[in-house]
Image (cartoon, coloured by chain):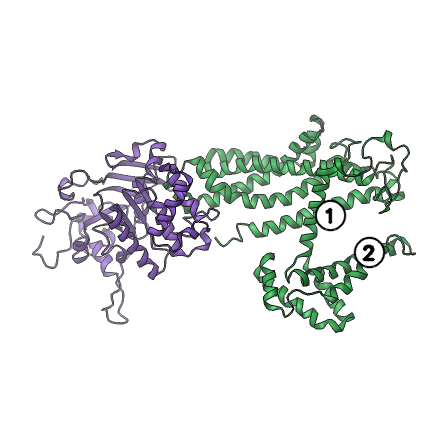
Chain colours: A green, B purple
Amino acid sequence: MSDIVESTGPAEGGSRPGDGADHLDHVRPRGVAGTAGRGSTGGRWGTARGPRPRHLSWSGLGLAVPGIALTAVSPTVLPAPGWVCFLAFAAGLAVAYAGVARLCRGAFGGSFDLMFWLCLVWLVVLVLAALLAPVLPLGEYRDIAKTIEAPAMAPPALFSEHPLGTNNFGLDLLARIVYGARASLLVSIGAVAIGMVVGGAIGILAGFFRRLTDTVVGVFTNSLLAVPPLILLIALGTVLEPNLRNIAIALSLLALPSMIRMARAGTLTFAQREFVLAAKAMGASRWRVMVRELLPNVLLPLASYGMVIVSVLIVAEASLSFLGLGIQPPDPSWGNMIAEGEGNAFQDHPHIVLVPGVTLFLTVFAFNLIGEKARKRWDPRQAKL
Amino acid sequence: MSQSPLPADTRPPAGDPAPLLVVDDLRTEIHTRRGDMKAVDGVSLTLNAGETLGIVGESGSGKSVLGRTIMGLYTTGATMTVSGRVLMDGTDIHALTDAGRRELWGSDVGMVFQDPMSALNPVKKIGLHLTESLRRHGGLSRAAARARAEELLRLVGIPEPGRRLGQYPHELSGGMRQRVVIAMALANGPKLLIADEPTTALDVTVQKQILDLLGRLQAELGMAIILVSHNLQVVAGRANRVAVMYAGRIVELADADALFAAPRHPYTEALLSAVPRLHHPPHSRLEAIDGSPPDMVAPPQGCRFAPRCRYAGDDCRQVSPRLLSEAGGDAARAFACHHPVRPVNAGGS
């Protein structure tokens, strides 16, 4: 993500030479904070070194305002063909991002990671919306009988009754996205939770007892990995009734092998450390050693890996629903919403596919980025101890 | 091949009727792919309450395995076989159930490990390390355990103990961590402390501090210590008696002063002469013991030190010498050698 900032930096420096000092101002604290490694400590460095510790970055403001304006104006007002509008929109986004990143670094210190916070905000908003869906003033998402009056295939219009448009039955897409998030997030996070608890427990047992337990678990893990995931899901879909619980259980099978392997590998390395022997020498039973000594050490990398796996499972759930094996319409899920664009719908009304598609993309991106960040921080291979 | 138990006359003076620890013909075999490795091969010794026994030997001589087997951390299982008896206050540690041994560990017997970096769990705070065992064995309440933990940290010389309880191991230096490990071992007032190379991972100035600390704690708390080390200086002056181990056996057992003054076993003599001295002339060659320790899967017949021994005769390669004390000599002293080194001051043997 720093690539984006860097690549826009020189272009901006050329266009506004008067802000050279300002530009340098940002480069130094960012470099220092890069070695410090933590977002929170970076701010202190910035305030300690910079002559103007917390300031309004004029170059940032100069970029942000026209960028946001371009982004807002391009899709609707600009009198140009579609692809020009799209390019203008993308350029506006990039410029606005660079500007806001600058503003934030000026305001919160040199190592402020805008992308991380954007991802976090997106996930928080998504989760809150999904939780509070019934009390939010949303349109109809499920009952076709109530939308006979509503326009079908209405294009997105921010300040209308249907901000993200409607589908072919006139159901509100924003409402369907929010209710679809309930299904997608519940299923994928539930599946990761099941995978983490079951896989973590099996992995720790296998790594701790070795011998027969390990062999049996190894055969089980390898056979799970040997079955192509989509085939496995389709096979399960024919047997199980497609409700949230069963889909979560089916998807957890995808997370299970890697969770078992990670927990087992972690247990193997930590079980050889002297603190395990020390715990035994202090009179700890085997269960106590596993729960109190090994589990906390194994859990951190497992949890951060879980964040990454959530994004894989969101896509897997969407694929299942797209194939008609997951959440059944009219109940919305991002996967079956994308499937509504089958046939000619996508050519004539691209928003039918784009709205759930972009939502899916942003969510997966956010989970991945935050998961990566968590993994980097808690990966045992990077830890000094 | 077999080594007889230590004869009665080599045991410490009979003023103390029941020694704290009696180890009788202890054997630990580790099953490997190549065969059974005899890590500890017939070790017998006794230890009185409040006494310090040093166990020295080179790497791979079975010191650490002996320490852990005495403690009962290694028991007969799939990967190893343990035989012999270890009587702690009259209870055979190896005859106990797992639960019974766990009761013993951390209360009557404490252990200090070699590497304080890995002997503490990186994700647990110092306080939890200490209070867990206090609450389990001592049955203390949360507040009482915390107060006792603070007291323990003060006892091992850690400044600001209250603040340390809330810190993680990586926030402490190596010496501080080893003090914490010692405090953990002391938590429930053990009668026996097994210190397995407690200073090997520390730098020299900290080594002395830790050893002095162990000595002070022993004087205050009156526990017995088994001090395992490959470093003769660590043991010298701190142990009452010293056992020299070679290839899984004790080759010489004597009072520390007597042993360092006049070694009787050739291996002990060679070890002592391999120590660099300040009064040696500069650039003089350091004495080394030729050869390498025997393969413990298939140890040589007879005396195991014979291939490297300059006094070895034919009998040494045939018959394994037993750990005996000399007729008419010092009763507290025993060695396993057919051709012992003559003491410098005494007439002959």
Q: Nearer the viewer, residue B46 or A213?
A: B46
On the question of residue B297 being in view, the answer is no
Q: Is residue A357 above or below residue A74?
A: above
Left or right: residue A33 versus residue B216 is: right
Three-letter code, disc 1:
Leu
Identify the image quadrant of the N terminus of chain A.
Answer: bottom right
Query: Which numbered circle lies on residue A71?
Result: 2
All told, the count of numbered labels is 2
Foreground mark, 1 or 2?
2
Expressed as whole percent of the image width and height from the top left, the position of residue A380 reads: 53, 50
Query: Which numbered circle lies on residue A5?
Result: none
Expressed as whole percent of the image width and height from the top left, the position of residue A173 reads: 82, 40
Query: Which numbered circle lies on residue A362?
Result: 1
Expressed as whole percent of the image width and height from the top left, the position of residue B195 reads: 31, 48
Q: Chain of mark 2?
A: A
Q: Nearer the viewer, residue A18 or B88?
A: A18
What distance separates the C-alpha of mark 1 from that of mark 2?
17 Å
Q: Dot 1, crowdedness within 10 Å: few (<14), some or many (≥20)?
A: some
Q: Nearer the viewer, residue A102 or A344?
A: A102
Quadrant of the rendered image containing residue B212 = bottom left
Left or right: residue B322 versus residue B83 is: left
Expressed as whole percent of the image width and height from the top left, the position of residue B125 reads: 46, 48
Q: Chain of mark 1?
A: A
Q: Nearer the viewer, residue B37 or A286?
A: A286
Left or right: residue A269 versus residue A35 is: left
Q: Secondary structure at mark 1?
A: helix
Q: State which tag comes first along the sequence, 1 or 2.
A: 2
Q: Secondary structure at mark 2?
A: helix
Q: Are marks 1 and 2 on the same chain?
A: yes
